Amino acid sequence: PKYRGPAIGGGKKPLYGLDEATGARDVLVVEGPTDVISTAQKGYPAVGLLGKTITESQEGDFRRGYFESAIVMLDMNAPPGTPYRLRPKPKEVAERIATVVDRVRIARLPDGFDPDAATIEMIQQAISEAR
């Protein structure tokens, strides 16, 4: 796995960057630490799943009511032939977050870009077109 993240009580993964993003009304949901740091430097509060799917403990973090809305922006650059279990699943992540957050959308960056490599303009456009 790309993100091993810190194991906490039974291997639960925290939402990376949750402390820094708390207080923001809206948050980007990205994969890992580099995405969180990069998007935050570009002015967008973010939390990282430390992977391509959401865990029950991370869902619980959203349940605590930190955010009014979430925009799922996962890396969509899985190489051809990547097994399904290792591919990003933004719809699944969004559906699970939507059970506890009022407004959840999915944003897609241009092919070949992830939140870390995207420009501010690319992120803005992806957010404005998010569904």
Image (tube, grey):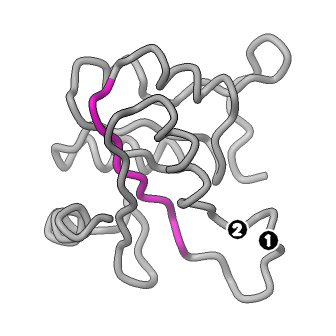
Q: Is residue 101 above or below residue 115?
A: above
Q: Which residues are magenta?
A: 67-76
| Residue under numbered circle 2 | 87
**Residue at x 17%, y 65% (from the top left corner):** 128
Name the residue nearer the viewer: 130 or 17.
Answer: 130
Measured as percent of width and height from the top left, residue 59 is found at 58, 29
Q: Amino acid at mark 2?
A: Arg
What's the mark number on residue 130?
Answer: none
Q: Quadrant of the C terminus?
A: bottom left
5 to the left or right of 96: right
Cα distance between the residues tagged 1 and 2: 5 Å
| Residue under numbered circle 1 | 84
**Residue at x 16%, y 63% (from the top left corner):** 124
Name the residue nearer the viewer: 125 or 77.
Answer: 125
**Residue at x 53%, y 29% (from the top left corner):** 15
Mark 2 surroundings within 10 Å by alpha-carbon count, few (fewer than 14), some (14 through 19), many (20 or more) = some
**Residue at x 59%, y 28% (from the top left corner):** 58
Q: Is residue 79 above or below residue 61?
A: below
Measured as percent of width and height from the top left, residue 110 is found at 35, 81
Q: Main secondary structure of the magenta part?
A: loop
The image quarter in which residue 41 lies: top left
